[in-house]
Amino acid sequence: MSDRVAVVGVSQVGYASAITDRNLEELIFEAASGALADARLAWRELDAVVIGASDLVDGRVISSMVTAGPAGGYMKDLLAVASSAEHAFVLAYLRLAAGVGDTALVAGWSKCSEAPIPQVEQLSLDPFYRRHVGMDGLVAAALQAAAYRDRYRVPEDAAARVVVKNRANGTRNPHAERRQRVTADDVLASPLVAWPLKALETPPLSDGACALVLARSERAGALRRPAAWVRGLGWASDTYWREPEDLVNSRALAAAAERAYRMAGVQAPRREIGVAEVYDVTPYHELMAYEGLGFCGPGEGARFVGDGQVSVNPSGGLLCANPFFASGLVRVAEAVLQVTGRAGGRQVEGVRRAVAHGASGLAGQAHTVVVLEGEA
Amino acid sequence: MSEPVIEIEQRWDIHYRHAAGETGSHFFRALRDKRLLGRRCPACRRLLLPPRGFCDRCFVPTGEWVEVESEGVLEAFTVVAQKFTGLPDPPYVVAYARLRNADTAMVNYLRGIDLGDVRAAAQSLAIGMPVRVVFRDRPEGRMTDFWFEPAQR
């Protein structure tokens, strides 16, 4: 993969608890055309479109039939990915790195307000051995959180401190659905959802769409837009049949991070990464991500909260906005904005390298890690 | 003799509530007045029916509303003769019709013909034949408010 690939356009629409003035297709069109406009790339000059979406969330089977057009796919060699929107990013990167086209648009979205998300998640379980159990993504996340707390004797307030940090960050993100600060006391006093998760430790389910434009080296230069170069990329899927101990220190995240860092030449993540946008589906998952991304050792996540060297989730993360299937791609978008100095009020000073982390599948069966770098 | 295989029965029953957006809602509201409204693409100038907030062939937003005439031509059809799981009881006709000033064809049922003999019914229809839109008495703002019928020349 000698060819360099950069993200040169970003668009986010939403995120909000319900977007009803635009239907799903119109929401996607707005994000896709916004990303092209941001890249100053005419749609006719776009080579490829890769979308990542869930049929069951969209309520349309082979949903690309209706969503390809608004994503800019008319007469382009569109591909649709059904595992997660960050995997669509991976595929778009691979296309360009392989020399198949010079530009590609990636889009992901969810209109959670239109679909029964817990039911959709339950249907992702196998029909034989687990679907009878009352388990959705949040219940699976609670199992992980409880196992993590127990394994490392995580203090009660560590998760609350993550929520307080991310909610404060969210006040500076115009795309955040939740834009009010909370205190640790608020978090601890919020009602229990599924042990040990309290209401303020769970993410919203948002409506919104996110699109990125990628370009190969010469083309990226010719567009004369702030470029975020993809320096490292790794992704891995664990077995569906994970054992309880596997729920805590994800092998898939470790493998994805190792691959991304090796490709990017990152040796000491805590010193070399300025910003991390991680998949904080709960604050415990943010703590686990610190460890999986190598910012600290196993079990040291609680002590890493508020670390001065790596700013984690300056966007506010999923705890402030969660367009479900697109949330991993949003992490990439936010990391791109940070390394190109375009993150507005949530910009972290002096960020050259950022890492984006996405997870998919119940209890984070699959993980993706992307290392992005701005211009020197 | 091997043991019998056990099968696990599952039923999916998922409730969605899809927001039609402002464009779709305007179209559905007009149906209650027995009017069909299309949107014109500012780039290719096609009048799109059903209306879309953007033209996917030109990748631009649309804006202009235009009322669509109720007469047009049949452009494609089939007469469904067999029962399919979850679909209406046969026989019925699914048709594509292009209304006079629209640039796109719309899919809906075609009624108003004798379906007693399916083959004869299919032969009584011809691509290019004139059709018209017929509304039900009390439209509710849904696609089921109207259908196509053969029109007199």
Image (cartoon, rainbow, N blue to C red):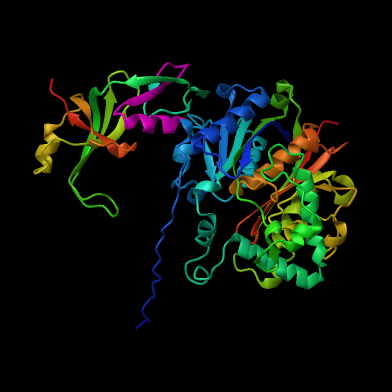
Is residue B124 rendered to the left or right of residue B95?
left
Residue B123 in the image: above or below residue A296: above
x, y percentage for residue B41? 45, 19
x, y percentage for residue A81? 55, 46
Front-lying residue, A272 or B16: B16
Instruction: Residue A290: tell me if it is visible.
Output: no
Is residue A6 rendered to the left or right of residue B144?
right
Q: Quadrant of residue A284?
A: bottom right
Q: Quadrant of residue A48?
A: top right
Q: Quadrant of the C terminus of chain A?
A: top right
Instruction: Residue A139: tell me if it is visible.
Output: yes
Which residue appears at 86% of the width and 52% of the height? A306
Which residue appears at 62% of the width and 27% of the height? A36
Front-lying residue, B87 or A20: A20
Residue A258 falls within the magenta-colored stretch: no
Front-lying residue, B149 or A374: B149
Which residue appears at 43% of the width and 33% of the height? B25
Name the outermost residue toward the bottom.
B1
x, y percentage for residue A146? 71, 69
The stretch in magenta equals B23-46
Is residue A99 rendered to the left or right of residue B28?
right
Residue A37 in the image: above or below residue A156: above
Is residue A211 rendered to the left or right of residue B101?
right
x, y percentage for residue B32? 32, 32
Which residue appears at 32% of the width and 38% of the height? B140
